[in-house]
Image (cartoon, rainbow, N blue to C red):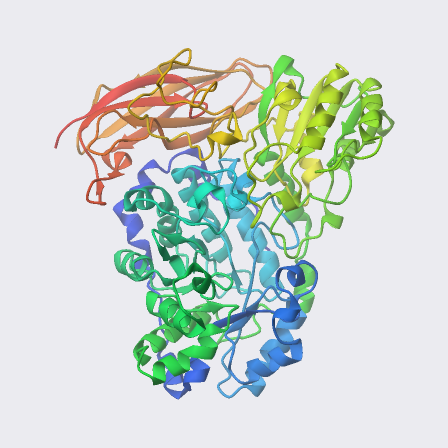
Amino acid sequence: MFDTRISRRAALMGAGAFAAWMHNPARAMLWQAGALPVPAFIDGLIARMTLAEKAGQLTLMPAAWGGGVATALNPAGNGPSFDGQLDEVRQGRLTGVFNGNGAEMARRMQTAAMTQSRLKIPLLFAADVIHGHRTIFPVPVGEAASFEPGLAERTARAASYEAAAAGIDWTFAPMVDIARDQRWGRTMEGAGEDVLLGELIAEARVRGFQGKDLKDDDAMLACAKHFAAYGAAEAGLDYNTVDISERTLREVYLPPFKAALDAGVLSFMASFNEISGVPSTGNGWLMEEVLRGEWAYQGFVVSDYTGDMEMIDHGFAADAREAAKLAFLAGVDMSMTSGFYRDHLPDLVEKGEVPVARMDASVRRVLAMKARLGLFDDPFRRIDVKREKARSRTKPTLALAREAGRKSIVMLKNEGDLLPLPKAGKRIAIIGPFASGQHDINGPWVVYGDNGQAVDLATGVKAAVADKGLVTVVEGSGVEAPVPGGIEAAVAAARAADVVLLAIGESENLSGEAQSRAEIVVPAPQMALAEAVAAVGKPVVVVLKNGRALALAGAVVQAPAILVTWFLGSESGHAIADVLFGDYSPTGRLPCSFPRSPGQQPYSYAHKPTGRPNPPGDLQPYKAHYRGIPNSALFPFGHGLTYGRIEYSGLSVAPSMAWDGELVVSAKVTNRGSRAVEEVVQLYTHDRVASVTRPVRELKAFRKVALAPGASEVVTFRLRRDNLLFIGRENKPIVEPGKFDVWIAPSAETEGVRGSFELARA
């Protein structure tokens, strides 16, 4: 059984002892040390294959036998019947399928491959196991709010434990795209806006999915996606153009992919978007020069769903044949869904337009991966119907889901110490479209989980309080439409209550892929509900459901207490109740900045100062800000409150750091409150003068510190020259001597304690 406990190494990483690790040259050697072996029999197998069979090994298709959400994602009408797909298996025309219907489906398909195909090459079964399989964990951006890479590793390990038992060899996760425009719906699938946090979460999830040995029956192949810069889509519009400098690409968007590679990820997925006029699926510079050349990557690259086909609509390829040629020669080994490689690669090779050696190299990568997964040794190692059921939604995985849920919750406000609520003696009205019901709990991008098995808010609250009769539940409004009589019923319930839990925000179909939003606000009908309930005058706790940062306004932002609860998965209601009633003091921090207005997007705390920054204080004319609002977040990256009262003091930092030396930076953090808490202490720097302008702040390390009531701890970080790297004018990493500002603070836009130091010349 998988172990939900955190390892000592993972704990250290989560606590901030990763500063040296992040820039240690030994880190770059990991991939070389674990070079992908190619068993001797594979070249002999390739020599026996026809061109059609080789193309089959480079063709991945949606499973014809899906069911439920999988069918909605991959409509059966887009391909053959299950019997037809079995015929393709017998003919060697498929390397595998994805989002299929569990172990029984996999057993039947693998049996056909191993008994009825000419070469008996095992199939590869893949799936979108994004934030859980049957047990659903918080959406990744919510889990990133825990600021615990070790937690992300454990939930990925648990997801792999469940999914591998259902015959799944390969997951299309983690998504490691940096998201700095909250209009982009796929924000929910990554780790937010910060590069360092993105790197750490990427590494953790790769380790979790792949386990100790890919041949283990509870390990899955991970896939770093989407390569590259998908999160930089113009205006946050999904699938849109990306046009950024190579420096920004290398400094912001590529590092999490490199971190995933260094953690041992063995598959990459090309992104849908173009970069500076070249679609990623046809971008040889990206795949061959950077990924395989500079980074020495030895795994394989798969297109995203119909990514090669979409180059035709991009205006980059004239037809299917040319699209196949461009994608393959650019370095995309495997085609997903379109069938273009199966249909056109044999002819392209026969005509001399694609070298047979290139085709053999891609087939070798895929077959070597199947060998590393143990499929040639035992094609059925992950296919066991009894084991599939036995590993599904076990007590340990559900307990982990509850832990992950409560650690993902971010408390934005808590005026007058409204929270935590007492468990007895208070009449509670839960009002809003997410107050109760088996809907919108698990979150977007769940293929196999069931909202019907998830715990809603009302159930969680009622399980926590002493008298369920004191809890009233009223819908009040739909997500995007009013409910007849809803506001009147909500107002009546609020008047009869001592405190209101206002459960509002986004539904599952307002976040995720293809759900870009021009206005990242609480929908108007819910805002009308919030205003009416607030007018009653009772204390209101906003319980926000969301897959991205939102621009909060009106009665919502004016509420005395606000909890960001994202989509927390299977144990959602229990996890929220744990925080509401004080069984757990909130520890989450924002992985993405909440803007003052949707019009601020894209926004990141790590923005450049410009030549006309507004000085501290009132807004001044002819300075860099929008009319009426400062160039800052409403709730910045890293923000989150606890049930304590935290003070920062006593910064200690030497005036200079030797070129080859180490700088110790420390501060005292004190809990003046009456409850035990965990504070996420964050270290930021700013390079005052550089040959390339630098962001106003950059996160360099963080540490989670447990503080008893009245307790203090001196929190220490260590900086080295490598922590001050940036991408210079030649698009290479450099470090320059000079003056640096440094903060130890509770968020990216608060002072905490501040000092400075000088990096000496060599």
| Vertical placement of residue 229 versus 323, above or below | above
Q: Is residue 725 visible?
A: yes
Q: Is residue 267 visible?
A: no
- The single residue placed furthest to the right in the displayed view is 469
Pick the residue in front: 536 or 298.
536
- The single residue placed furthest to the left in the displayed view is 762
Pick the residue in front: 753 or 507.
507
Q: Dividing the picture into quarters, in which one does residue 527 lie?
A: top right
Q: How many marks?
A: 0
Quarter of the picture containing the C terminus is top left
> Residue visible at 72% across and 19% down?
534
Quarter of the picture containing the N terminus is bottom right
Whole-percent x, y for residue 11 in the image = 46, 39
Whole-percent x, y for residue 148 in the image = 49, 38
Pick the residue in front: 523 or 646.
523
Pick the residue in front: 4 or 84.
84
Whole-percent x, y for residue 133 in the image = 62, 55
> Residue visible at 46% across and 83% down?
53
Q: Is residue 690 left or right of residue 472?
A: left
Whole-percent x, y for residue 26 in the image = 28, 49
Q: Is residue 576 left or right of residue 238?
A: right
> Residue visible at 76% across and 23% down?
423
| Vertical placement of residue 74 versus 733, above or below | below
